[in-house]
Amino acid sequence: MLNMVHNVQYFKWFERGRLAIVEGAISVRWGVEHDLVMPVVKNTCEYLHAATYEDELVVTTKHRITPRWTGRFTFDHAISKAGNKREVCIGRSEITLVDFKTNRILKVLPNEIWSRYQALT
């Protein structure tokens, strides 16, 4: 149907939620200054119910503290209809930090980033 939300849109909403959290630990400016990029390494979505463009939707994103040595940040997402609170989809994404100069993943997060990330809870 033409009025149904396309599946790729959910990942865009997940990204907004994820970036809102990440900005509290690592600003884009700080990442650029330290030659770090944050690529998505895992993105999943389970579609539970259809959503239309007329629906008012609420995106909820929570971060999960994983062991520091994994070098990853994990986020759980849920998108619900505002009116009846019915979940439309749930998902998870993981990002990592990559040193732009060496193109290597940072397996152990720097102390400065790790402490700010943990403080977000």
Image (tube, rainbow, N blue to C red):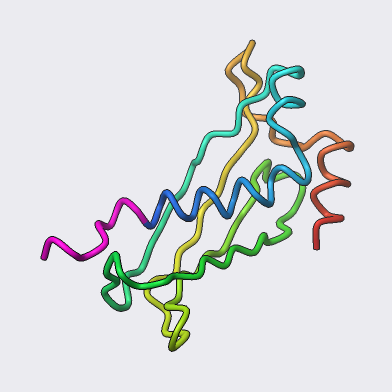
Judged by its main secondary structure, the magenta piece is: loop
Q: Which picture quadrant has residue 37?
A: top right
Q: Which picture quadrant has residue 2?
A: bottom left
Nearest to the observer: residue 71 or residue 55: 55
Give coordinates of residue 3: x percent, y percent: 18, 64
* Most distant residue in the top direction: 101
Q: Residue at 50% across / 60% down in the picture?
A: 92
Question: Is 108 placed left or right of 99 in the picture?
Answer: right
Q: Is residue 15 magenta?
A: no
Nearest to the observer: residue 65 or residue 54: 54
Q: Residue at 35% across / 68% down in the picture?
A: 46
Q: From what the image shows, is residue 84 above or below residue 11?
A: below
* Most distant residue in the front direction: 54
Q: Is residue 4 magenta?
A: yes
Give coordinates of residue 11: x percent, y percent: 40, 52
* Most distant residue in the bottom direction: 84
Give coordinates of residue 73: x percent, y percent: 65, 49
Picture quarter with the C terminus? bottom right
Q: From what the image shows, is residue 120 above or below residue 56?
A: above
Mark count: 0
Q: Residue at 71% across / 42% down in the picture?
A: 23
Q: From what the image shows, is residue 52 above or below residue 21?
A: below
Question: Is 10 placed left or right of 63 in the picture?
Answer: left
Q: Residue at 61% across / 38% down in the picture?
A: 96
Picture quarter with the N terminus? bottom left
Question: Is 11 placed left or right of 27 in the picture?
Answer: left
Q: Which residues are magenta?
A: 1-9
Give coordinates of residue 61: x percent, y percent: 59, 63
Nearest to the observer: residue 116 or residue 107: 116
